[in-house]
Image: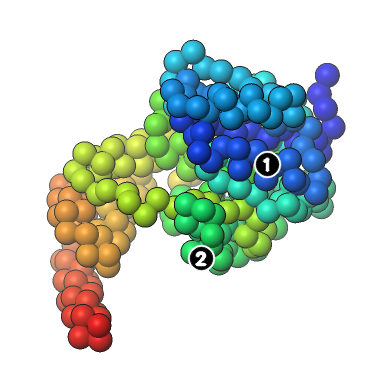
Amino acid sequence: MANSPFEVDVVIPVYNGAEFVGEAIESVLKQKESPYSIIVVNDCSTDQTMNVLEGFGTRIRVLQHEKNRGLPAARNTGIRAGNSGLIAFLDADDAWAEEKNQKQIQEFRDVPEIGLCYTDVADCDSKLNPIRSNRGFRRRKGETVFSELYLKAFPIPPSTVMVRREVFHVCGLFNESMRETEDFECWLRIAMKFPISCLPEALCRRRNNPHSITNTSRLDREVHYRLRAFDLCAEAAQRWKIPLPMELMERKRLYFYRRLRESIRWHESQAEAFFRAQLVESGGLSLLRKTDLRLLKIKENIKARMKKWVL
């Protein structure tokens, strides 16, 4: 028998997260409105994760994968194991503000037609000290956002998300073949079928990795899964007879173009060369945009020189 439609199962996937997962769980236990259950899915960790989880005793429910299956599979295991009307996700290295659960549950009460609610987020260092107090997300109250999400790919951080369980029955679970971008692909499907809300308060603290490395192998992987997300979105749209806001190939070109601009802005020469080649190969580097990109590069080089002079 299902629990109340406003009870919450919290799903925490973890792989080798011994350093931070305890802090994530504690932030859930401190919620002003307690969840019905905390389901931690240990994705075959090889560090001391299990020792940390055992320290919480019966306050959490631990499920184990016999082999490492990846983040989307771990989330799906947690979803299937619960029975509450609402499901909230928390990555093992993030943490919640005490009122997060309470405020999102209230949003589902106030706007019963929504399928998903997310919040703003504070970007933090390894000790969860805020680097940026919020991302400036705007308030959304039961909005139809599919076109905007498809065209702009605006962020919906998984650790801020709460979803109505019935949504997964309609739209499907996370795609387990996606080792990256699985959240974006899932949110696109949900946005096709259900209105979405956003609370503009930073109710989640997220650890950023300042040492991420850009290399060709990493970029190949990013492109593979991002393009796959668009392909899967197009397949779902065709299946449900929902028109895409932009033709699929043109949307992929737009992705290459935006990533090229970002790499120029952040002076990432390897990424710039990579995405320029992708854009040329896709037939998307028009004369207008060539000029646009050349001017952007000149502007960014001038800014970099001025910064050196100031220093």
Percent position (x, y) of residue 22? 60, 38
Q: Are marks 2 and 1 in contact (CB under 8 Å)?
A: no
Residue on which disc 2 sits: 132
Name the residue at 71% across, 25% down.
57
The image quarter in which residue 7 lies: top right
Residue nearest the viewer, comparing 207 with 152? 207
Calculate the distance from the C-alpha at mark 2 to the C-alpha at mark 1: 22 Å
Q: Secondary structure at mark 1?
A: helix
* Residue highlighted by disc 1: 26
Residue 66 versus residue 224 in the image, above or below:
above
- Indicate left or right for 60 with 290 as reference: right
Q: Amino acid at mark 1?
A: Glu
Amino acid type, callout 2: Arg
Apparent side of residue 115 relative to residue 224 in the rendered image (left or right): right
How busy is the neighbourhood of tag 1: few (under 14 within 10 Å), some, or many (20 plus)?
few
Q: Position of residue 18 (x, y in %)?
A: 51, 33
As drawn, which residue projects farthest toward the top?
Answer: 66
